[in-house]
Image (spheres, rainbow, N blue to C red):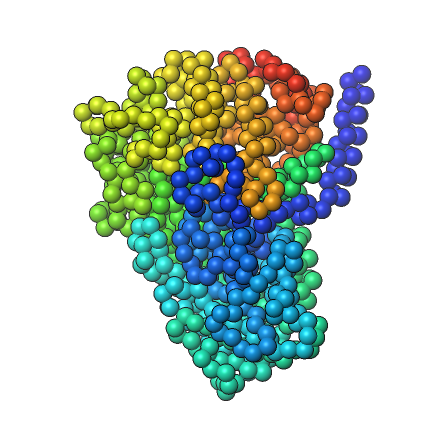
Amino acid sequence: MNRMLLLSKIVILIAWGQFIKAQDLIQYVQPLSGTAPSTTTAAQKHSEAGSEKNANTIPAVGVPFGMTQWTPQTRTAETKCIPPYFYKDSLINGFRGTHWVSGSCMQDYGSFTIMPVTGSLRTTNFATPFSHQQEIATPAYYKVELPAYHCITEITATARCSMMQFTVQQDDSLFLLIMPNSDRGEGEVYLNPVKGTVWGFNPVHRIYQGWGNQAGFSGHFFLQFEKLPVSGGRFSEVTPPTGSVTNKHGNGVYAGFALKKGEKLRVRIGTSFSSATEAQNNLRTEIATWDFATVLSKAKQSWEQALAQIQVQGKNEKDKRIFYTAMYHALQHPRLYSDASGAYPPFTGGLPVKKLSNGQYYDDFSMWDIYRAQLPLLQILQPARVNQFVSSMILKGKQGGWLPIFPCWNSYTAAMIGDHVTAFIASSYAKGIKHYDVTAAYRLMRQNAFDSPSKEDYVNGKGRRALSSYLQYGYIPMEDSVQEAFHKKEQVSRTLEYAYDDYALSVVAKGLNKTADYKELRKRALNYKNVFDSSVGLVRGKYIDGHWYEPFNADRREPYITEGTPRQYTFYVPHDVNGLANLMGGDKALERALDTLFVKNEYWHGNEPGHQIPFMYNYTPSPWKTQQVVRSILSEEYSDGAGGLSGNDDAGQMSAWYVFAAIGLYPVDPVSGEHLLCSPIFDKVTLQLPGNKKLHIVCKKRSEGAIYIKQVKLNGKPFSRNFITYADIMKGGMLEIELQQQPGSWGAAPMARPAGMK
């Protein structure tokens, strides 16, 4: 009987393997998703600013984790919270090589734009109408028809380069305008019409700490035209130049071509953060052909391989579209910064350019967001790349003197709260991802946790904000308004997040036998208790003398909370949920507190601090409520189409949440490696793991309405725990989850729940 069962499972897996190989997964990706405002109930209720209602994603063409993405441009300049493309816009004013952090409320940098114009040369008012019906967007390819110009634009890309193809639909003159998007008029562009090349740069400027200062490096670009231009010059010139032309005022240069109907003009573009020479070398390395289809084929192959790391099967095609769009968004960042030669701009200064002997250098870590689920997803799927992420962090710390907290545009920012680079490195270390200088990593993490920088360094964004208050009182009191930060005040949220970061560092300290540090950090990991007001059962602002902030509004945004309310932030104790439950009065009290949040419609999925909350019922006698709530969020907060995300996607965190939840897992505490279980929405899921291992998740339902877990088996044996460890996931095997229509008792026993901090 057992042999027959085994044989049947083998047959199922063989058939499943043949099915997934036949899938064209890129067809499910909708790059326009998130380019329009969300209309979900939670977004309407909790989003304070207009930008919070936008996912702020763009229809990015490229490959996973690429240096530069390529997008149609409907908004000019590099403005905070304004992505280059909005679905609602009706005019295109160029095609941009962008470094926009996908789904963020930051700003583009080091970017440039190419705009095709036909007929007579226009250097102003050249924006032209387009329609979404004449637009094709995939991760590897973008195409749009510009009817007023009788021109079709197509784009594909590699990690650092792109090829654009322009087709005129009548005999015409085609002018390409090339413009750096410098808001300060600092970019330069050079044209050599004799060689058919253009090169230039756009200096990068910091925001948040050091706002407006130069970051010390630029976005460089190098273009080659397949045909030599018949005219070219500065925007103010219309006569053919005899030599190189430069524009030092940020306006741009143009190159003109005479084309026949149906004729194509191809442009190859290289980019770099090091120099135009490296941009040219990147182009030489990555695109040696003028055949557009060849470049496109390689880009598609790159995405198919990345998307196929998780293969899903089910009857609902909409779910597949949402899932693989989420995968696409979750694989955009962090950003590749090093060139094909290994050259890269060093952290916090950019010069002189350095060179790696091996590996890659990455930046643009939206760390307050992505340590929660996006990076843990990559720790499963691509641990070798994660190792390079950690190595990049250590390089930053060595070059700048302090471990950064939110490293973007290759600079210190202190943009958000917490110290989650520490949490990320600790979670990687705890999962066995440690092929880097662990001693240096610990030294840098410890420095952030125990030491305060000089005033000059602090103003520059180095070190934890308000650390001295945190160490002195065990919390950050209301008297410390944390002025030297973009997010000022927010004392309670900072206390909670530092407590988690201290716990994370304690795990590394224990692994390295740093006993004294371990004991101190474990004590500090309980600091969340110091801002919990038992009289209201929630966290609350607190003064030095111990009295609480008045008035108390549980469900309003308060100055001591980051982008949320006291009720929402109370549940941010991912490392010690059982300890939080004890403060509330036990696991049933925790359950009631969670119930209240959801009944009052106070859960806000559109922002990250609460992403762990739906899974916290797994710490109570009613894990079935996690299954119910998560299924509801998957249905209500995500959809396909342009408005398909419920808030800023924040470098893929919102999307990574969907990926995890849809396959039935979520890392409430990434450092612990415990992934809490819920009910998958797909019939079958296969995770392609390193070492050619696979984890198959098979979901059995007695009816379509079955969403509650009846029983679970791991490799054929009953599995009673309501979580699965990272180690078990990485071994591969088969996880079978049987669902039923009514709530059950599976996973409810205290021994079945995550232990949390011990």
Closer to the camera in the image, 201 or 216: 201
Asked whether, in this view, residue 505 is left or right of residue 713, the answer is left
Closer to the camera in the image, 40 or 72: 40
Residue under the point 62% across and 55% down: 132
Position of the C terminus by quadrant? top left
Against 430, residue 356 (above or below) is below
Q: Is residue 420 visible?
A: yes
The answer to which quarter of the image holds residue 561 is top left
Residue under the point 54% across and 14% down: 748
Q: Position of residue 397 (x, y in %)?
A: 36, 47
- Count numbered badges in the picture: 0
Residue under the point 47% across and 50% down: 101
Residue under the point 48% across and 41% down: 647
Q: Position of residue 718 (x, y in %)?
A: 65, 17
Against 247, residue 73 (above or below) is above
Against 101, residue 654 (above or below) is above
Q: Position of residue 696 (x, y in %)?
A: 67, 31
Closer to the camera in the image, 450 or 64: 64
